Amino acid sequence: MSRARRSPSFWALLAFTLAVCAFLVVPVVLSMLAGVTLNYFVGWRGGLTLDWVAKVWTDYRHTILLSIQIALACLACTLVIGVPAAYVLARSRSGLARAIEELLVMPVAIPGLATALALIVTFGGWGDLRKSWVFILIGHVLFTLPFMVRSVLAVLASIDLRTLEEGARSLGASFAQRFFGIVLPNCRSGIVAGSLMVVTLSLGEFNMTLLLHTPLTPTLPVGLADAYASLRIEVGSAYTLVFFVILIPLLVAMQWASRPRDPSSTTR
Amino acid sequence: MSGIPILLERCAKTFADGTRALHPTDLEIAAGETVVLLGPSGCGKTTTLRIVAGLESPDEGGRVRFGDTDVTEVPIEKRNVGMVFQSYALFPNLTVAGNVEYGLKVRGMPAADRAARVREMLAMMRIEPLAGRAIDQLSGGQRQRVALARAIAPRPRVLLLDEPLTALDARLREDLRLDIDRLLRSLGITSVYVTHDQAEAMALGDRIAVMSQGRIAQIGTPEQVYFEPADAFVADFIGTMNRVAGTIEDGALRFEGGRVPLPAGHAAPYAMFRPEDLRVADPAHADFAGRVVSAFFLGDHLRLVVDAGGETPLVAKLPPRAGVRAGDLVHFTVDAASIASPAER
């Protein structure tokens, strides 16, 4: 293959692919570079610095920590609600279950602003909830739950869950024994993929959070918008850089965790 | 591992959509006996098995007994049955050894005893080298051996097999059938085996229950269902059955191609016999004659399709060296003792 003469169409396709990659990657790289230049308008020849990053860390640390806190809490909520929900939906053959599966897409289809307004109208008057970060969490759970459910459901639908459970039952396994010993381990890849979606979506959620947050509870994306709107572009770019530094190891770690694993290497 | 008798009393199953999968059925299985439920798909055999297993409950009025215990209300988890599925149902998150161990683990057996029992089971099914393998690294035959080992490991009172060989190819099926036969004989465990394959049923069953449209059409030893089929369905489902219609004259059935001698007391105006009961004879002593439509040489025998003037052609099974070709006129005799007369449908 490597020695075969490449046709002109091969080179055309390669050029097109590289152009698309550049289109996606160049703005990101430029933005991150801007965060470490002394002066954006002079460019990187003017010198590099980490001062902007340090400034972001001192001024906006609380937004970063709050975003991580909300993302982890959101992950916990979607795991506890979403995985059992997916299990019940996978087990049920009724039309109602299929209808619920369809309805689960709704929070994704409705604009985040509309959902946020609905939450404010409904829960805005509940004591101090409106002022709490939990209010944002509720919105994020609502938004990300379908991703967890559908991701787990897709795996459960592919593994003949019913027969596996019948096999476990015939061997004497109680509901708890087969749920934790058979069902959960066998939908691990779906849970991991769902968790990846939930955490990244929660970290980057802006539309809904813009309305749900208060001056006391700004999240990372809200702070980022604020920085770009009101401060030097170098600060906003340094902020983006910090955002990527948080997000990329997370993405890599979860991809690594979701690789197909061989049970013979993990048990004894 | 000692067996336990199973008794189904008036067990019927009607599904939520109103379809009757099983009409009220009685079935008695002796301790240590292997009963094969045989029939085409949709005949109710799997439903019957699932009622014995406890995966389905019978309609109101039906009872399931294991020995003296009424287990109708007992869920499968508590019935102590071993089950083998057509799709294996092995746990992909566990190794071979982990699968075999699972039933022992959920029962709380100490780890040392579990390890010993797992080794014993793997040795019995001749799969020790596979102990540490992942399930997706196994062939179909290996998977079903693991499934058998897993089902037997906790010493169940009853072994239930739902089409265990259907997903395998022909050669493997033969091998595994021998293994299952050896296993059932040596364990002496009461077992119920569901299949649509009559050869499997004949080979493994102490008794065969031939099922059709939610009813047991006949239950008996392989010899009984083969030689004395209760009705035309059973006769056709088990092997090939020739049918000749005509008029009774002098203790024989007269038809276009000649005559068929009848056993004493045969009153129906038709006779049925198996292909292997036909013998070639010289014209002077023959009962009837027919023209060979097709001749298939199958190695161990010669299979003929013969037009003897009846409504349907007859099938004859001859020794491989009979030297008969398509187009030949062949004369046959048939023994009155081999004539069956099951009820017509």
Image (tube, coloured by chain):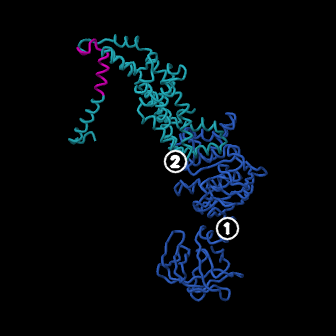
Chain colours: A cyan, B blue
Mark 1 residue crowding within 10 angstroms, few (<14) / some (14–19) / many (20+): few
Q: Nearer the viewer, residue B259 or A76?
A: A76
User: In the rendering, at what x and y percent does residue A3 appear?
Assistant: 25, 40
Q: Does residue B283 lie above or below A55 as drawn?
A: below
Q: Which mark is residue B139?
A: 2
Which residue extends farthest right?
Answer: B68
Q: Are the residues flagged by discs 2 and 1 in contact, CB closer than 8 Å?
A: no
User: In the rendering, at what x and y percent does residue B186 appear?
Assistant: 69, 52
Mark pair 2, 1: CA separation: 35 Å
Left or right of B75 on screen, residue A76: left
Q: Which mark is first along the chain, 1 or 2?
A: 2
Disc 1 on helix, strand or loop?
A: helix
Q: Which mark is residue B105?
A: none
Q: Is residue A35 magenta?
A: yes
Which residue extends farthest left?
Answer: A8
Question: Label 1: which residue?
Answer: B223
The span picked out in magenta is A25-43
Q: Nearer the viewer, residue B251 or B171?
A: B251
User: In the rendering, at what x and y percent does residue B332 appear?
Assistant: 58, 82
Identified by mark 2, the residue type is Ser
Parent chain of label 1: B
Q: Quadrant of residue B49?
A: bottom right
Parent chain of label 2: B
Left or right of B186 on screen, residue B238: left
Q: Is residue B333 magenta?
A: no
